[in-house]
Image (cartoon, grey):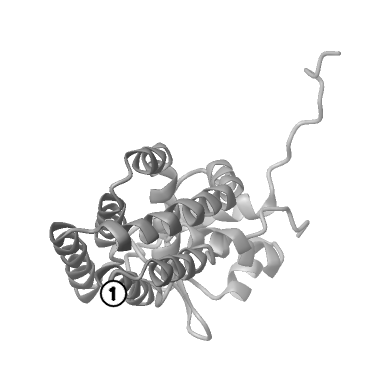
């Protein structure tokens, strides 16, 4: 049976709110650090419920475009609110749990093997990655490049060609999960501390502790706003 006459998808209200907010920012001359109008005002001006506005704000927050300060309003992170289509965001949300599950399985084992097999050269690369991440964070960044270098150094220290190949096959998805996690307030510093715990266990050649520390770290990474975001329409 042909599905050419299947019901057409209706644009969800929060998607319309997103479109209006993205147009509003440049029209109003808003730049990084500027505050959006309160949710109640936005709902009144747009003629929608506060729930629809809140849902749109959550999408912008998940995309790293705004910072929501509890009791202090919503502020632009950059000079615009342009970002990936909501459909692509929904697709990333759907695949993220599988990516995080794979990361836990692979990276826990890699940390264990690294503690058993690391060389002095491997330890130097791990320390350099930690220093790089710390410098990024001190400079106001999220530490994403240092994070990438750290996990690459641990993978190299495991000296397992097959596991390294497995990691390469999901490298793009790992990058997504890294960005989702490190965007969250307070997460970069916490992530760096967890990396240091993994590195200490590897340096001391404690495989069990290295694996446990990496497992705790990846499970922290899994607690991202994107997985808490509900893309279903709210009807208002």
Residue furthest bottom in the image: 71
Q: Position of residue 132 (x, y in %)?
A: 18, 65
Query: Relative to residue 180, is residue 176 depicted above or below?
Result: above
Q: Position of residue 117 (x, y in %)?
A: 27, 56
Q: Quadrant of the N terminus?
A: top right
Query: Relative to residue 5, is residue 137 depicted above or below?
Result: below
Query: Relative to residue 39, is residue 53 depicted above or below?
Result: above
Residue holding disc 1 = 200
- Badge 1 crowding class, 10 Å Cα cut-off, few under 14, some 14 to 19, many 20 or more, is some
Secondary structure state at the residue bearing disc 1: helix
**Residue shown at 70%/62% (left/top)?**
48
Residue 118 image-quadrant placement: bottom left
Residue in the foreground of this view, choosing between 92 and 104: 104
Residue in the foreground of this view, choosing between 211 and 151: 211
Residue in the foreground of this view, choosing between 159 and 66: 159
Q: Is residue 15 visible?
A: yes
Q: Quadrant of the C terminus?
A: bottom right
């Amino acid at each position: 049976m042909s599905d050419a006459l299947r019901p057409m998808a209706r644009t969800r209200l929060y998607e319309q709110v997103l479109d209006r907010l993205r147009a509003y920012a440049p029209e109003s001359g808003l730049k990084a650090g500027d505050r959006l109008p309160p949710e109640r005002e936005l709902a009144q001006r747009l003629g929608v419920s506060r729930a629809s506005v809140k849902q749109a704000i959550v999408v912008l927050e998940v995309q790293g475009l705004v910072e929501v300060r509890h009791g202090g309003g919503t502020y632009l992170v950059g000079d615009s609110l342009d970002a990936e289509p909501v459909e692509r965001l929904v697709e990333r949300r759907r695949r993220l749990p599988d990516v995080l599950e794979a990361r836990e399985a692979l990276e826990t084992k890699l940390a264990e093997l690294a503690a058993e097999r690391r060389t002095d050269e491997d330890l130097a690369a791990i320390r350099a990655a930690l220093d790089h991440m710390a410098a990024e964070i001190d400079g106001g960044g999220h530490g994403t490049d240092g994070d990438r270098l750290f996990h690459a150094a641990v993978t190299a220290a495991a000296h397992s060609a097959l596991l390294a190949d497995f990691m390469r096959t999901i490298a793009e998805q790992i990058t997504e999960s890294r960005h989702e996690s490190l965007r969250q307030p307070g997460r970069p510093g916490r992530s760096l501390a967890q990396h240091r715990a993994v590195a200490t266990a590897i340096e001391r050649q404690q495989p069990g502790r290295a694996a446990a520390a990496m497992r705790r770290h990846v499970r922290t990474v899994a607690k991202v706003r994107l997985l808490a975001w509900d893309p279903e329409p709210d009807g208002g």
